[in-house]
Amino acid sequence: ENTDPTCEGSKVYTFTYTDCAGNESVYTYTYTIELDSFILPANGLSAVGNLADAVEPTPPTVTDNCGNTITPSPAVKTDTPDCQGSIVYTFTYTDCAGNTADWTYTYTVILAPFTVPANAGSTVECIVDATAPTPPTVFDANNNEVVPVMAESNDPACEGEKIYTFTYTDCAGNTADWVYTYTIDVTSVPVVPANAGSTVECIADAVQPAAPVVTDACGNDIVPVITENTDPTCEGSKVYTFTYT
């Protein structure tokens, strides 16, 4: 018999017949080795929530039709998308006869929604203290910082709420709001000067005095409501009362 071919080729068995007179005849049987194409498993596919999870997969173990293991080429990876999309790893298997086939593993990256901290707030007396807060730092599922857009409500006329809303939107369009609410609550009583007075002889001289300048806790002037008692018939008290609210 001849030497085995390394892959494809011919394997020949030769039978030589010799009679007693030394006459010879040769009979041969030839195997033609032609390696059929091998079969790969189905391609792989999975969905992940971020790009970091799209790691290189382990390719399947593949043998040719004679049971010999075929080592695939190193993986060829498609470009990584900026946000979400597909990442494909391709492994090429080639047997000794040159038969070739590709096995692919496809990751579908669907960016998972991010989370924001719980809403926050505080109470202040003056609208001037209801300044825009510093929003929390938020990262998307790919660990990229998401920069928010701020919107604010109108200032209340006196007390009420001043609301700042920060809207975060990642590259995939996932969105979430973080809200900071100021409760405007004026609790300080207006501070007025000590009561005053004077003595005059005639009711005509008991004219209404100038109102003291009084501001609220936030520095806003308060216009008082002025009331007066009935004039005394002769002597007595003429009282002007300034009420600041």
Image (spheres, grey):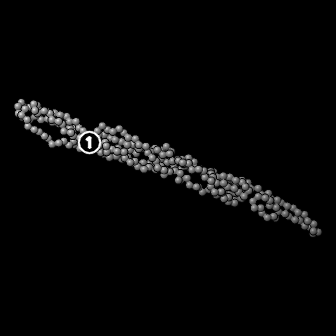
Measured as percent of width and height from the top left, residue 8 is found at 76, 58
Residue under the point 11% across and 33% down: 206
Judging depth in this view, the residue of 229 and 114 nearest the camera is: 229
Residue under the point 93% across and 68% down: 22
Measured as percent of width and height from the top left, residue 75 is found at 62, 55
Q: Answer with left or right where residue 232 lies relative to residue 158.
A: left
Image quarter (top left, top right, bottom left or bottom right) of the C terminus: top left
Residue under the point 72% across and 55% down: 98
Q: Is residue 85 above or below residue 242?
A: below
Q: Answer with left or right where residue 245 lies relative to residue 177.
A: left
From where the camera sits, is residue 162 visible? yes
Q: Is residue 223 above or below residue 34?
A: above
* Snapshot quadrant of residue 57: bottom right
Q: Is residue 208 above or below residue 2?
A: above
Give the residue type at disc 1.
Gly
Q: Answer with left or right where residue 179 lies relative to residue 237.
A: right
Helix, strand or loop status at disc 1 = loop
Which residue matches tag 1? 219
Q: Residues within 10 Å of mark 1 (few under 14, many from 20)?
A: few
Judging depth in this view, the residue of 229 and 71 nearest the camera is: 229
